[in-house]
Image: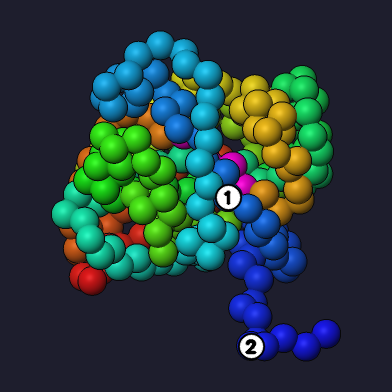
Amino acid sequence: MSYVFNPPAPVAVPVVGRTERYPVHRIYCVGRNYEEHAKEMGFTGREPPFFFLKPADALVVVEAGQTGTIPYPSLTSNFHHEIELVVAIGQGGRNIKAADAKQHIFGYAVGLDMTRRDLQNDMKKQGRPWCIGKAFDQSAPMGPITPAEQAGDVDKAAIWLQVNGSDRQRSTVAKLIWNIGETIEHLSAAWELQPGDLIFTGTPEGVAAVVAGDTLTGHVEGLTPLSVKVQAA
């Protein structure tokens, strides 16, 4: 098959303990999935889950032991961090029951849903899509994937983010409003999940702005940490 221009190389993430890489299909993100974060965004209660997407090439793949870089993005003066557990799908399906969800999980990783908060808030006020605030270039840094059988009890794992060595966000995955299985059940009712799909499961409270020069270090207990430095535009 010939193309009018050379297609880009597939986006792929390293896998802990393996030479093969994980090819990425789609990136799904869950909005407001920790109660305290929902409150700091002006919402309360256990609302039905909702989702938005980022393009696969928004990923900034950071190898184990390295510090990745992301530019301070254009059009914003309020660039926020959101630390998240990322679920990597290994077996696709539609209408997956929460009780069966773990059979579809390949592994887990640490990710950041970087957000142009001022642009997102402007879109909210106008009732318009959030894409400009969420789905921009290099908005999804992510570390290596740990296979599920090596990841320990992710459902109860601590999750935290430090900026320049000081805590910004700290919680546990157990505080997800919609747990991993329930999230997969809801998501697979709306889309047929595919191998290569990533799910950013939501962020705890403590989201805040970063500036050029800041170093962000994200952790989920039992997984490879993620380190990213913000560079000047």
Please, is residue 75 above or below residue 153 in the view?
below
**Is 53 placed left or right of 228 in the picture?**
right
Say which residue appears at 36% left-offset and 60% top-offset. Answer: 228
Question: Within the magenta stretch, is there residue 108?
Answer: no
Q: Which quadrant holds residue 31?
A: top left
Question: Measured from the top left, where is residue 149 in percent x and y?
Answer: 74, 40
- For the residue carrying disc 2, how many other residues have a C-alpha within 10 Å: few (<14), some (14-19), or many (20+)? few
Q: Is residue 210 visible?
A: no
In-front residue for pair 113/188: 188
The image shows a total of numbered marks equal to: 2
Q: Which residue is mark 1?
A: 27
Q: Which quadrant holds residue 45?
A: top left
Question: Measured from the top left, where is residue 170 in percent x and y?
Answer: 35, 31
Q: Give the amino acid type for the residue marked by disc 1 in the picture.
A: Ile
Residue stretch in magenta: 198-202
Please, is residue 157 above or below residue 140 in the view?
above
**Is 11 placed left or right of 188 in the picture?**
left
Q: Secondary structure at mark 1?
A: strand
Q: Give the amino acid type for the residue marked by disc 2 in the picture.
A: Phe
Please, is residue 156 above or below residue 87 in the view?
above
Secondary structure mostly seen in the magenta stretch: strand
Question: Measured from the top left, where is residue 7 in percent x and y?
Answer: 65, 80
Quarter of the figure that contains the N terminus:
bottom right
Q: Secondary structure at mark 2?
A: loop
Camera-near label (1 vs 2) is: 2
Q: Which residue is mark 2?
A: 5
